[in-house]
Structures are given as structure tokens and as C-alpha cells.
Image: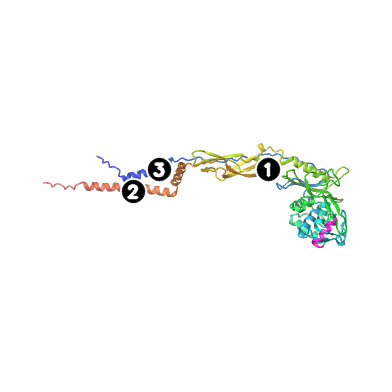
Amino acid sequence: MRRITKKTPALRAVSLIFSALLLFSVLLPVFAEGETETEAAPEDAPRMEAPQLEHVGSACLYNFETDSVLYELNAEAEVYPTSTVKIMTGIVALEELADRLDEPLTVTEEMLYPVRGNAVGLMAGEIITPRQALYCLLVNNANDAAYVLAFAAAGSEEAFVNLMNKKAGELNAWNTVYTNCTGMHDDNMKTTVSDTAKIAKYAYRNETFMEMVGTVRYVLEKTNMSEYRNVYNRNCLISKYYLDSYYYEGVVGMNAGSTPQGGYCAVAVAKNEDNTVTYLSVIMNAESDEDEFYNYKGTVDLLNWAYESYSFRSVIKKGQVICEMPVRMSATADYVTLAAAENLSVFLPSDVDVENDVQISCRTEEDFLRAPVKENEKLGVAMAVLDGKSLGTVELTATSDVPRSELLFALERVKKFSSSVFFRAALAACVLLSVAYVLLRARYRQKKLRSRIPATRPRKRR
């Protein structure tokens, strides 16, 4: 008959602990992980038809806000710089004479000896200031003012031209070579529309320069040798004094002129009514006839096309819900929505259908969130994509609070603990100890049982 023995309290405790650990490792809830979906960019994005400029050799149109070129025509072709030379003359003079703009400056015969072409009538012995000379140069394209500034800044025209060429190199205008400070024709002087745009963009950042080139009428005050003189802007996009048919509302300045060899040029910076869009138009080597100056007409056509064809469009609005993310450790919500923290406006062609052509993708560091989640907490970014190219990004924030469930949090910690190396080692040790205990206990009982059986002696045969 088998003898049935009862489990001791120690053995029952080990068994209960072992069973509980196995139960936790098997029955703990496992939450499905969520993923943030991204939408593909459209295969084809609309493109605006560029204007056909007639009788224009080279041209470009640049947008400052996006640092992008919207239009180019023979932009790298070599051309004569003509009057655009005075943009560089003004830059170098302003920088070299920055601390002497209002000091007296006496005009000399040496300064005036090379003067040809347009002038405001400066005379040897006349006392003016570099600031006054700069206004005459940049408002009226005055060649006498250009030479006065060159000698005042560098001691000679040759030294000043060296400074001009050095500055062109600093601006990466490698295809530009200056031989004089006025733009009067020289076969060895050259540039490109691309280089001229680089130089004009640099000049635009100088507030004093832009104030001067945007002045419609400048009054050169009475000097020791002359009564006051009215100096009118020769750029017909800015001033109506010489010709009013090309005046363009919004042009804030730059340069225009011509030579027989280099044709007509016009460099213009224009802003829209609320100053949110700024264009730089460069037209060079243009023609003229009885009806048109094509440097001006080309500029007007380019600017009209740009304002009609491009604008800043809202592609993501503040508070717009972009995506949702799964949330763990919460008993009240399985997910939280993410919304744009700010507006995203992008410079786009006007015929882009923002709703259908612009795709919005959501990018987060994790595939899911763990509660608690706080409202307005930054959790990722949204990207606007058109034609496979990013238009910009905005931060994404949670639209609501999601509290944490302490019970689920505790279970999660137990789950992590049960999958740790330490737990597995401890569990293995418990199993080994339990087996060893059972074996030792069985052996002990067996020995004890044997000790209770009395020894019997064998009977003797008679």
C-alpha cells in the first residue's frame, strides 16, 4: 500500500510563488503598437507658364523670401554691364566711406577729367559730402559723382576698380570684370545676369543703399559754388519725371540705363502691398524701338507674371488635426490626436490645389505614446510635401490630456520585470531550488522510513 504524504508549509509557499510568476508572465496584457502613416507626394505638380520676353537678351527673376529663382533667360551668357556697374560702385563707396559720409569733400580737376556721359554738373573746387555724391550716383546715375567717390575712397579710379573686382569675387560673381566705375563701354568689361543678381541681392541688404536708389527726387543743397539742384531718379520704374508709361507701383529701387554696345538694362526690387513678397528682376542686353524700351517692358511683364502666378498659401493651419497616435497605460483613451502648433504658409504657384496636391505627412519619434500625455505637449512634426519636395514643417502637439492608469502602469512594470535577465535568472534559481528541495525532502523521508523498520534475525534450523 502506497503511503501519501502531505506538502509541508515551505513546499506549498515555493509552489505558490512559482505558479504566480508563471501566471503573470503568460497572462499580462500585450498592447498592439500603432504606426503613423505618411502619404506619398503627388506624381505631377502644376507648373506656371513663364512669360515670353521679346527683344531681351538675358533676364532672371528672384524671390527673396524663398531664396529661389523663378525665371531665367540666358542667365550665364556674357553681357556688357552698362549702368549696372553703378550698383557695385555704390556698394564699395558706401563700405569704404562708411565713417566719412558726412565729412566735407572737395571736388578736384583730377576727379572730373575722365567724366563722360550723364552728370549732375559737379565742379572743381566744389565742396560736397560723400553722402551727397552717393545720392547723385544712385538716384541719377551721375558719372561725375562716380569718379568723385572713387578718388575719395581709394585715391584713384584704378585702385577703386580693384576694390570693385575684389568685392565681386567675394560675392562669387566670378564672371564679372570691371574696368571703370561708371559703366561706360569697354570691350574688356563683362558680367552675366546671374552675377548681377548676386551683386544686387547683396546691395539690397544695405539699408542706406536701398534708401538712396529708391529716392524719386533728391535735392542737392546749395554749395560754395552752386545753388541747390534737383536730382531726379532716371529709373522709369520708380520715377515719372523722364517717362511715366513704365512706372510700377511697388518698385522700391535699384538701377537702369544703357550703352549702344550693351543695350538697355533694368534692375528692380519690388514689394507687394503688405511687404510679404519681394522680387528682384534683372533685365540686360535688351532692345528698344519707337514704341518700347524692352528693359522696362520686360521688367513689368516679369513682375506682373510673378504676382499673378505665385503667392503665399496656407498649407497647414494652426490647430489643424494632422494625425493620431496610440496611447498605452491609459484606461480612458486608446489614442490622442496631434494638431499643428502654428500656421505654415508656403510660396506656391497660384494654380496649385493645396487641398489635393499638397500632401501632409506626420513624423514622430515613437510609434505610440505612454500615458500620461499633456495637452500641447510637443510630440512630433508635420511636413508638407509637393512633387516629392518638402515645403516646410511645423511642430505637432497633443490636443488633450490623457491620464495614466496606475493599475496598467503597475502591470507594465511587472511585465518588464518578468522579462528581465535578473527575473529569468531568479526564476531558474527558484526552479532549481524547488527541485533540489523536493529531491532532498524525498530522500530524507525515505531514510526516516527505513529507520523505523525493526531488524529481524534469521531462524536456526533444528
Residue type highlighted by circle 3: Leu
Which range is magenta?
A: 143-155
* Secondary structure at numbered mark 3: helix
- Which residue carries the number 2 mark? 436
Residue type highlighted by circle 2: Ala
First in sequence, mark 1 or 2: give its number. 1
Give the x, y percent position of residue 86.
81, 54
Estimate how packed mark 2 is, as few (under 14), some (14 to 19) or many (20 or more) residues with alpha carbons within 10 Å.
few
**Occupied quadrant, residue 339:** top right
Q: Nearer the viewer, residue 257 or 398?
A: 398
Number of the front mark, 1 or 2: 1
Where residue 22 is drawn, which disc sits there?
A: 3
- In space, the residues marked 2 and 3 are separated at their CA atoms by 19 Å
- Which residue carries the number 1 mark? 346
First in sequence, mark 2 or 3: give its number. 3
- Contact (CB < 8 A) between labels 3 and 1? no
